[in-house]
Amino acid sequence: MLGPPRLTERLLKRIFPDDGIFTTIGDLEEVYHNIAEEKGIDRARLWYRVQAFKSVLSYIKNHFLWSIFMFKNYLVFTTRLIKRDKFHYFLNFLGLSTGIACSIIIMMFLRNELTYDQHHENAENIYRISSNYLTSGKPLLYATTSPALGPRLKEEYPEIKDFVRVLPLPELLFRQGDRRFYQERIVFADSSILKVFTYPLLQGDMERCLKDPNSIVLTQSLARRYFGDENPLGKVIQVENQDDLIVTGVIKNPPRNSHVPIEGIISYSSWSMDELALDVSMYEPSGYTYILLPEKYNLATFYEKFPAFYQKYCKADEELYGQVYKLIFLKLKDIHYNTVGFRFEMPLGSRSYLYAFFFIGIFILILASVNYVNMATARSSTRVREIGMKKVLGSRRKDLTFQLLGESLLVSFVAMIFAYGVVLLSLTPLNQRLDLNLETGMLLNLVLIAAVFGLFILIGILSGIYPAFHLSAIRPVTAISREFSSGRTGVRIRRSLVAFQFVISIGVVIITLFMNRQIEFMRNRDLGFKKENVVSIRLRDNDVIQKISTFKQELIRHPDIISAATGIGQPGNPTTGLYKFEGRDGMEDHNFWVLWAGFDFIQTLGAEIVEGRDFNPSFSTDRQKGIIVNETLVRFMDWDNPIGKRVAQGTHTDGQVIGVVKDFHFASLHNKIEPMLFRMITRPEDNLPGSVPSKLMVRLKGQSLTETMEWMKDRWNQFNPNRPFVFSFLDESFDRLYDADRRQNRLVKIFSYICIIISLLGLLGLSSFTSLRRTKEVALRKVLGASATQIVLIMFREIFFLIVVAIVVAIPVSLLFIDMWLGKFAYKTGINPVLFGAAAIGALLVAFFTASYHSIKVAQTNPANNLRHE
Amino acid sequence: MKLLSRPEELFLLSIWRLQDNAYAVTIRDQVNKITGKTWSFGATFVTLERLVQKRYLISHLSESTQKRGGRSKRMYNLTREGIRALLDIKKLQESMWDDIPRLSLSAVKK
């Protein structure tokens, strides 16, 4: 006969284990058979199932309902504990939420960084093609390719689904009505950009909006900037005071984590080169080429067919350029972190910054958890009796472990909620200080929430696991008997944890001090020119440049303006060029740094001529022939008498050195001073091939700076109403070369503050418990005549050793990091032992004051109060 | 003196009556028969378990049958305390009934 339902039976076995004998299930089965004989098998099965269902109900009731009651009980217990020990819980909670807040920010940052360019649906199959022009075996890498490459590849390789050429543009002057802005992040791009990449079109026609010349697609925010709430479609934006662009589409604001940030797309056909694009040699790269390949495409098949392509389009130019052309494929998501070292690459991310962030996050979390462990073990003395009592009343070890873990989970849960609020408030200032692009909306991201939740569980368990096992293992007899010397347990662990915190804090502080020193050093170092009080005004239109000398003359007449000069490039931003120099055996080719200068350029910079003379308008030949070199170049060429040496390039076929400038730092202090030369810019009216100025540098006296700037702006607007007055201060733009270093410095500084706070909290906790533990000792000492000062010092001795050990460990470790960081600078401050001393003394002082907070309290109490219980 | 509840009394009496054949199925059948109601297995087990805890019953395992899927029976026997508890409650009830002078329905308020 058919037995009872198997699955149900198995369920019942779980509910009534009965030591594996299953008499209960036997009873049920017997009745089942009885029913089956009387009323049929179906009724029997039904009955059996109903029995099972009922059992499940009561099982749930018995197991979970009671758990809930117990949970409530634990909760009550925990809140009572917190109330009784407000101070320590508060410290702990503060540390923990700081730690979690940091981790949340770091997770956001990591998420932001690791999802670069991932918002494109086709991201997996989009490749950027870059160029390698092999020159006599040596690679010459360009991120860019010829504009002909995309279309040609599409012709030869039918499997390529689509290609996109993207040409990022320099800042452009946009004008709409009275709104004029220099606009960054504008690109020329093929209309396929909207299909290959994911830029959801809110308005406009996907097929047509980028087809015609002079069409532009704007992002939502840009459209709003120029057109407010009006419908932008069909409206006109004037660019560079010349061309009118018609707005044909609006795209959703794209996420900022893209290697080519885009705010406006101008149709590729608007580019003057577009019609000739197909004729451009493969050896003349300009703009990026992206291709969309089919899913799971094997690049090997691409390379197989490449020789034919090469024969057709590259072979002819191979000899002309003397270079072998190779293609390099980079997956879209790999671009942001590529370390190939391409020329003309977009700004890239740095993995080391990423790792730094990651490890800082982990460190802070460890530090914060350490505090919890510390406090919980320290508190064990006060809780031993509670635990003992519970054990006597029948709590099993497992229950206690869970209860203690639950407590730490509760604390970390509250800390997590609090941390979320902190992050919300601190995001904007942090974004500014660390140059991050974290959006508040990301806080609601489910992945992030899940990660933070996981983090909370992790911290809760991590920080709770030691106390949980440690405390729950206490034997009830020892706990309840008076013999249990309170607080003995875990003292060593607590001390070493606090020492560990101090190692990290002191180390980070030392690193911060050195970073500060290096950055101060770079800022204050004599650069060989005077970077203060120099304003550099941007020049663009040809008609402006033609009249620039008039404007310059007008400026110089102002009492607060010392001199002015036009030029291309400036210290901090030089150009390079390949020149021929007169060497011992004929002319030698060298690629050196170049600054293009107008008259008075060197004087305006405040650099010094040590030999020969500056460019001078009375020598009519200076524009074509004059070259001024720096001392390093003279040394490099090993010229005994530099004046008159021949230098040639282009129109400068018979160029001559007319002067030597004293070495100055035209580039950042990361690099040694390299050979460089000045040559003169050309004027449009000279009708010479060469370069026209892009900057007008003005040296001011520095008094009444604002008024002078106002005055200059006023003059500029009269002189050239079409262009906004855009300027920068030379010292500011020069200092910007250290932005990355400063950002690292700020990051480490913030890290050091947090470390200090957390480890001080740890120390405060430790000292409060040591003083509590030693109340009787202190009372006895007082009775025997010790003064309060002596007692505070005795109490501090223990902590003193701790800190000294931490200092001894921290110094070599931090030295290692400092050495690594300073390695990037050619000019750097030495390792100054005073800083170590300062950090050490600082740590001791701060530790002393923190610790004395409690010891003074203990030292001042009346010994009678502490002794009378005996 | 601890008093038995009515179900407890019923169960103990059934087990007493069943002598050496008292296990969950037969006990439940017996109680069902006496009370004319269907007792759930849950109630049966809980009551039996409680009686064992109160030491009115002891249980031991006995042979298995095919019908039970090869599983043993848990047989129940009254202990000395169980019998005493039954006698106690019987005595109590009798003395209570004796105290009522005459049985009259009019004494019950409607």
Image (tube, coloured by chain):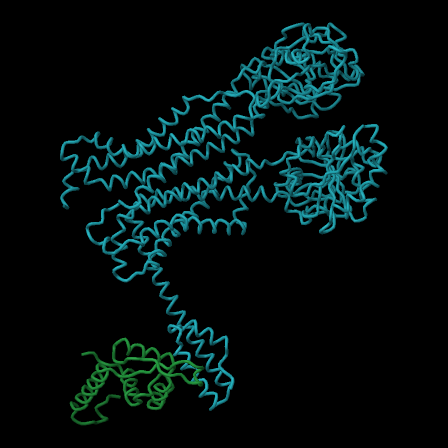
Chain colours: A cyan, B green
Q: Is residue A118 left or right of residue A466?
A: right
Residue at 45 percent across and 76 percent down: it is A53
Question: Considering the image in quadrants, where does the C terminus of chain A appear?
Answer: top left
x, y percent for residue B100:
17, 90
- Picture quadrant of residue A850: top left
One can see residue A719 in this view? yes
Q: Is residue A85 left or right of residue A787?
A: right
Who is closer to the viewer here, B72 or A737? B72
In the image, is residue A527 above or below residue A153? Answer: above
Q: Is residue A806 left or right of residue A115?
A: left
In the image, is residue B42 above or below residue A206? Answer: below
- Picture quadrant of residue B32: bottom left
In the image, is residue A249 above or below residue B23? Answer: above
x, y percent for residue A395:
30, 61
In the image, is residue A58 above or below residue A870? Answer: below
Who is closer to the viewer here, A575 or A282? A282
One can see residue A202 in this view? no
Q: Is residue A853 left or right of residue A612?
A: left
x, y percent for residue A328:
72, 38
Residue at 65 percent across and 18 percent down: it is A715
x, y percent for residue A285:
76, 32
Count of numbered labels shown in the rendering: 0
